[in-house]
Image (cartoon, helix red, strand yellow):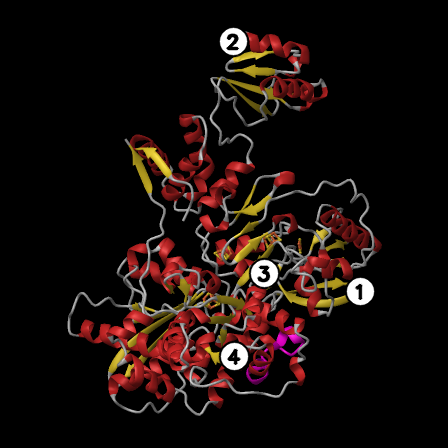
């Protein structure tokens, strides 16, 4: 039997089942269902995928396959201050990867993870449409432009 | 049907519209290499993701090369299958697949039987440019009771996914991740053991590489054989004798019953017995249960569950425990022949030869990987001593025979030992889809009507259709029989049972397409379903050759009841030969 225990609060289960029902419990709507769930919970842990599997009557392995295929789905909770680094072409060309490496070093986490105190989490994005400001970093709702690796420490300080 | 004309390698061919280039070429005797593609025509199973691109050809007027397994013919097409451009592209594809593949062919359990290895050989690959720079992934190995997953060897052909999802509808495996980390895995990349896997082994049966293989139990068997304190008893399932020869170069469908028996004796087993004996016993118990439920049902007893479902396939048992636990009182409680054999060997037979069950080792030779898991289930042991100690597959037996320098082809036929080696034709056909229920009908008919069965062969129950049905006339009582092989087909019949729409009195289910002859432990068919049909024919031949063809006529079964069990369905029989099922469905726990 599965080693993953599905323990959720009743209203969470009801919410997920409700989302599935609003898409007619149609497996074809999986991506939309997952989107709605991620919007609500912030991430898609195994427990949520299990309930979706029941709601849409499809194997949970398939759901996990979809969650791990698309980079906009995540299985780890976002930190209080989610940091996203644009890795679109313009940003990439202008050194976004170095900036990302600096964030990884400073926080001691990889893309898709959050810090132990859950203060920060790290993710990457495709072009956010601000190429003029490349490289672009988002922290929560705030946008930082022309970020250099040296700026990383100062940005993090703002959230201490 | 509308046909179209095209030219392949300067030869013209007419094919029905919708035919793939691959199949059209085949008509002309042109054998285009394929890797991910798989077509089990008679079983209606196809895998054509068009992903590996080994099968590409040049089509005049098109810029890109076309994968033939998934490209349809068009009228007037001019195709070249071996131009320089095609050969170079094919080589590049192959080199790319091989660049991050482990290079440990010498010690890989698929070696000699691996489609990737064969392809590298066929394409004449002699070096892999850049291999020294390529990263090889280090995916952990996952060992379950039956199956080993070594995903570093996966080439993402996704055949296993097709078998597990489309054919079996189990859905334990799915393609996960992307790019370099892409692989095929259970949900959350948990171990197979924690998924809903039934251990049917159909993924293993089609995997072209060493990524999916069975757990090897030959070393344990060898250890038992050289231990002077152990009496080692072996049983062989019906489907093994119809396939083992293939591993030694014999044509599919060659029966090697006598040679297999001789080889097992040469390997040093103390008693060479036959699972078929236990299959006859299964018919006695399951048939009695069927008649009991049926007659109670006819009398209006609403507690009599109809239809009765067969329970001799452990892959199928795992399936309903996961997916239909609400119906777990519907299948027969009779154990599988493998487990009935073990229970009788370690009680009746051990007593007879005056040894303690702990000094007896029971080994089973099975076409099946689910049996490895089954014999490890807690309920099939007494004080921690399992009724069946080790289950090895047809493939493992073949390797074992080769290791022991036995030339099976030159062996003289030998007979099974008595008493647990005697069987009837009814038990032989257990290996085919429809065989168990045909055997049950032969016995149930005579027990129910008290009349002799004139026509022994119920040909209406045979065939390769995924779901079949027939009504058998029990002297005025019409008995409706349903048959399904492959778990996806079983699911259809089960859904009807659940919703109360089922019209059947009895249903036979086998997890593997074709039944056990197509089991996950059999010699690899490499996508040729003719092999499975030849094995089925062989078992029907063996049945016809047997002097006794009804289970209740087996004199040693009669004796077993007289001396030991009492009558079919007795308390002792229930204790030794019946079991119960578990609810394995995942449950959501509500937190407060
Ligand atoms: S053994 Fe059967 S159920 Fe298990 S993963 Fe393979 S195909 Fe699926
Ligand atoms: S595990 Fe085997 S069958 Fe499955 S995708 Fe990989 S190579 Fe193909
Ligand atoms: S059909 Fe036969 S080989 Fe396949 S899982 Fe069932 S018992 Fe095993
Ligand atoms: S590439 Fe980063 S904003 Fe466009
Ligand atoms: S065999 Fe045709 S794409 Fe793989």
Q: Report x, y in % for residue B528.
A: 61, 68
Inter-mark Cα distance, 1 to 2 = 74 Å
Magenta stretch, residue numbers: B245-260
> Is ligand 2 less than 8 Å from the beta carbon at label 3?
yes
Give the class, few, some or many, for how many residues have Cα within 10 Å of label 2's Cα (few <14, many ≥20).
few
Mark 4 / mark 3, whichever is N-terminal: 3
Tell us which disc is closer to us: 2 or 4: 4
Res. B536 in view: yes
**Secondary structure beneath label 1:** loop
Q: Report x, y in % for residue B304.
A: 21, 68
Q: Are the residues flagged by discs 1 and 2 from a single subunit?
A: no
Residue B10's label in the rendered image is 1
Q: Are the residues flagged by discs 2 and 3 from a single subunit?
A: no
Q: Which residue is mark 4?
A: B270
Mark 4 / mark 1, whichever is N-terminal: 1
Residue A116 vs residue B295, the one in the foreground: A116
Inter-mark Cα distance, 2 to 4 = 76 Å
Res. B522 in view: no
Identify the residue shown where x is 45% and y is 42%: A28
Residue A91 in the image: above or below residue B170? above
Residue A160's label in the rendered image is 2
Identify the residue shown where x is 59% and y is 11%: A144
Mark 1 / mark 3, whichever is N-terminal: 1
Tell us which disc is closer to us: 1 or 2: 2
């Amino acid at each position: 039997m599965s080693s993953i225990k599905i323990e959720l609060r009743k209203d969470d289960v009801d919410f997920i089942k409700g989302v599935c029902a609003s898409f007619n419990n149609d497996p074809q709507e999986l991506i939309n269902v997952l989107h709605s769930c991620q919007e609500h919970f912030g991430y898609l842990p195994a427990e949520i995928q299990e309930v979706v599997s029941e709601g849409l009557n499809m194997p949970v392995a398939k759901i996990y396959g979809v969650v791990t295929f698309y980079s906009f789905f995540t299985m780890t909770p976002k930190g209080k201050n989610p940091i996203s680094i644009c890795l679109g072409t313009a940003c990439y060309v202008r050194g976004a990867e170095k900036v990302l490496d600096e964030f990884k070093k400073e926080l001691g986490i990889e893309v898709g993870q959050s810090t132990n105190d859950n203060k920060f989490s790290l993710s990457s994005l495709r072009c956010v449409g601000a190429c003029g400001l490349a490289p672009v970093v988002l922290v929560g709702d705030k946008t930082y432009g022309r970020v250099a690796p040296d700026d990383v420490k100062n940005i993090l300080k703002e959230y201490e | 049907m509308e046909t179209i004309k095209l030219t392949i390698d300067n030869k013209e061919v007419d094919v029905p519209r919708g035919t793939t280039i691959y199949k059209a070429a085949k008509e002309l005797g042109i054998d285009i290499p394929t890797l991910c593609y798989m077509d089990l025509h008679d079983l209606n199973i196809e895998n054509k993701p068009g992903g590996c691109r080994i099968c590409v050809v040049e089509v005049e007027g098109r810029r890109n090369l076309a994968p033939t397994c998934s490209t349809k013919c068009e009228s007037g097409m001019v195709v070249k299958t071996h131009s320089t451009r095609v050969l170079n592209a094919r080589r590049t594809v192959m080199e790319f697949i091989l660049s991050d593949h482990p290079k440990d062919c010498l010690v890989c359990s698929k070696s000699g039987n691996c489609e990737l290895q064969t392809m590298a050989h066929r394409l004449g690959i002699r070096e892999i440019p850049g291999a020294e720079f390529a990263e090889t992934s280090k995916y952990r190995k996952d060992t379950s009771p039956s199956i080993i997953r070594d995903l570093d060897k996966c080439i993402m052909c996704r055949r296993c996914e097709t078998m597990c999802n489309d054919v079996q509808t189990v859905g334990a495996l799915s393609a996960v991740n992307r790019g370099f980390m892409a692989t095929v895995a259970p949900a959350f990349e948990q171990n197979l053991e924690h998924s809903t896997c039934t251990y049917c082994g159909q993924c293993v049966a089609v995997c072209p590489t060493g990524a999916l293989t069975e757990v090897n139990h030959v070393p344990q068997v060898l250890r038992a054989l050289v231990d002077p304190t152990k009496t080692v008893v072996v049983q062989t399932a019906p489907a093994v004798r119809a396939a083992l020869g293939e591993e030694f170069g014999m044509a599919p469908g060659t029966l090697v019953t006598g040679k297999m028996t001789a080889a097992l004796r040469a390997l040093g087993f103390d008693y060479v017995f036959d699972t078929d004996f236990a299959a006859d016993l299964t018919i006695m118990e399951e048939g009695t249960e069927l008649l009991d439920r049926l007659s109670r049902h006819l009398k209006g007893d609403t507690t009599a569950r109809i239809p009765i479902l067969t329970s001799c396939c452990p892959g199928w048992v795992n399936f309903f425990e996961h997916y239909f636990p609400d119906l777990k009182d519907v299948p027969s409680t009779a154990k599988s022949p493998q487990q009935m054999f073990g229970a009788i060997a370690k009680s009746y037979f051990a007593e007879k030869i005056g040894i303690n069950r702990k000094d007896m080792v029971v080994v089973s030779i099975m076409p099946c990987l689910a049996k490895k898991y089954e014999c490890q289930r807690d309920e099939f042991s007494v004080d921690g001593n399992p009724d069946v100690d080790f289950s090895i597959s047809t493939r493992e037996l073949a390797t074992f025979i080769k290791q022991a320098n036995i030339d099976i082809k030159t062996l003289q036929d030998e007979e099974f030992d008595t008493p647990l080696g005697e069987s009837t034709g009814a038990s032989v056909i257990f290996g085919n889809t429809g065989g168990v229920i045909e055997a049950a009908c032969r016995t149930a008919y005579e027990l129910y009507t008290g009349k002799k069965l004139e026509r022994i062969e119920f040909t209406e129950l045979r065939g390769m259709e995924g779901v079949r049905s027939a009504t058998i006339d029990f002297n005025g009582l019409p008995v409706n029989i349903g048959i399904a092989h492959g778990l996806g087909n079983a699911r259809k019949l089960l859904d009807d049972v659940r919703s109360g729409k089922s019209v059947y009195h009895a249903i036979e289910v086998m997890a593997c397409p074709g039944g056990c002859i197509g089991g996950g432990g059999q010699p690899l068919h490499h996508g040729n379903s003719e092999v499975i049909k030849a094995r089925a024919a062989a078992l029907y031949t063996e049945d016809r050759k047997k002097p006794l063809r009804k289970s209740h006529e087996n004199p040693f079964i009669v004796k077993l009841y007289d001396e030991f069990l009492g009558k079919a369905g007795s308390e002792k029989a229930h204790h030794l030969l019946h079991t119960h099922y578990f609810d394995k469905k995942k449950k959501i726990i509500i937190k407060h």
